[in-house]
Amino acid sequence: MAVVIRNKFGAIAVNRIVLNKMVIEQLLEMEDELILCNKKGMPIKKNPTPFIDSDYYDAVELTERKNGVRIKISIIVIINSGKNIADITEQIMDRIEENFELLKLDKPRKISIYIKGIKREEIEKRNIEVVRRNV
């Protein structure tokens, strides 16, 4: 299925898999800060691969609304020296919005990042949701 965005110039149709892949690639570039996980909070890969495995699609959910796209992202955040949850989530959201602008698509109406845990020596369970809404 394609996500169709209408603007004053016409309609733009982008396949959902393309948008999912775009988001996953951005998250994989941040492998020093985060690990993709499934809805239960279990890491998808212990050692991330540079290519997109079909398992990664469990970490990103993209749902379509009437006038835009809503993205839900589930991740496990790894905090390194000097990094915090607010900085990492802000960086993720900014990158996603930049990619949508690159494709000339409207910004997603809502980006939700679910942080299921923080990895130190072990994964400390958390259930934090960070949301950005665009009107």
Image (cartoon, grey):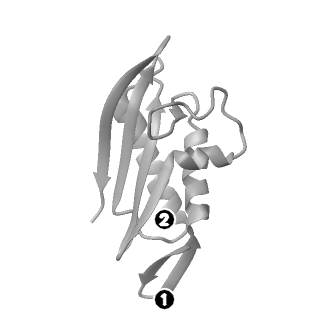
Is 3 located above or below residue 115 in the figure? Answer: below
Q: Residue at x 50, y 39 (%)?
A: 38
Q: Is residue 116 left or right of residue 20?
A: left
- Does dot 2 land on a helix, a strand or a loop? helix
Q: Which numbered circle lies on residue 101? A: 2
Q: Pointer 1: what residue?
A: 10
Relative to 22, does residue 29 appear above or below in the rendering? Answer: above
Q: Name the residue nearer the viewer: 27 or 128.
A: 128
Q: Amino acid at mark 1?
A: Gly
Q: Quadrant of the C terminus?
A: bottom left
The tag earlier along the polypeptide, 2 or 1, is 1
The picture quadrant where one finds residue 28 is top right
Q: Residue furthest top?
A: 121
Q: Residues within 10 Å of mark 1 (few under 14, many from 20)?
A: few
Name the mark nearer the viewer: 2 or 1.
1
Give amino acid for label 2. Answer: Glu
Residue 95 % position (x, y)? 49, 50
Residue 79 position, x and y percent, is 45, 22
Relative to residue 45, is residue 70 depicted above or below? below
Q: Secondary structure at mark 1?
A: strand
